[in-house]
Image (spheres, grey):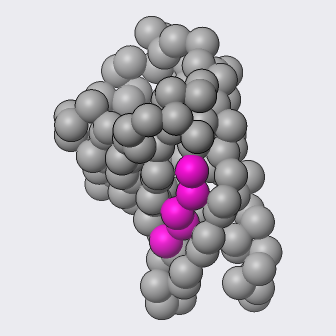
Amino acid sequence: MESEKDAFLEIESLEMELVDPGTRKNAARLQELLADEFLEFGSSGMVIRKHDVLGNANFSGETNCQLSNFEFRALGDKHILVTYRSIKSAVEIAYRSSIWIKESGRWKMLHHQSTVVPGVI
């Protein structure tokens, strides 16, 4: 059985993978990482579903993003909430949260939200 700490480390690694430009362009990998019911409330205010992400995989831009300040909370046996901060530049900072679900022995992102932080670091 996977320990809570191992699950947290795996999910942190998966969050890092999801912001990698190579992963963002890989529809097959995105298919594996996102739950079928995936839903995102983007910092743009748009609601994004799994089919939207997969449909835009070939058009994803080259965005480098630094993630930090990870915090995790188990929500029962199969769900984990992760919150963290992302930085694209000194003026592009966001607080993010994701809910991950364990399906068939693999962690998949079920929900994501990004909230832009106005101002600078």
11 lies left or right of 32: right
Picture coordinates of residue 7 (x, y %)?
Answer: 70, 73
Picture coordinates of residue 20 (x, y %)?
Answer: 66, 29
Q: Nearer the viewer, residue 27 or 74?
A: 74
Magenta part of the protein: which range?
Answer: 81-85
Q: Residue at x 54, y 84 (%)?
A: 74
Q: How many marks?
A: 0
Picture coordinates of residue 89 (x, y %)?
Answer: 60, 25
Q: Residue at x 71, y 84 (%)?
A: 4
41 lies left or right of 59: left
Q: Residue lying at the far left in this picture: please name it.
A: 46
Q: Is residue 42 above or below residue 72?
A: above
- Tell me which corner region of the image, top left, top right, bottom left or bottom right, holds residue 2: bottom right
Picture coordinates of residue 55 (x, y %)?
Answer: 35, 21
Magenta segment, prevailing SS (helix, strand or loop): strand
The quarter in which the C terminus is drawn is top right
User: In the rendered structure, does residue 16 fall within the stretch colored magenta?
Assistant: no
Q: Is residue 44 above or below residue 61?
A: below
Residue 23 appears anywhere in the view: no
Q: Nearer the viewer, residue 90 or 106?
A: 90
Q: Is residue 67 above or below residue 57?
A: below
The quarter in which the N terminus is drawn is bottom right
13 lies left or right of 37: right
Residue 94 appears anywhere in the view: yes
Q: Is residue 112 above or below residue 107?
A: above
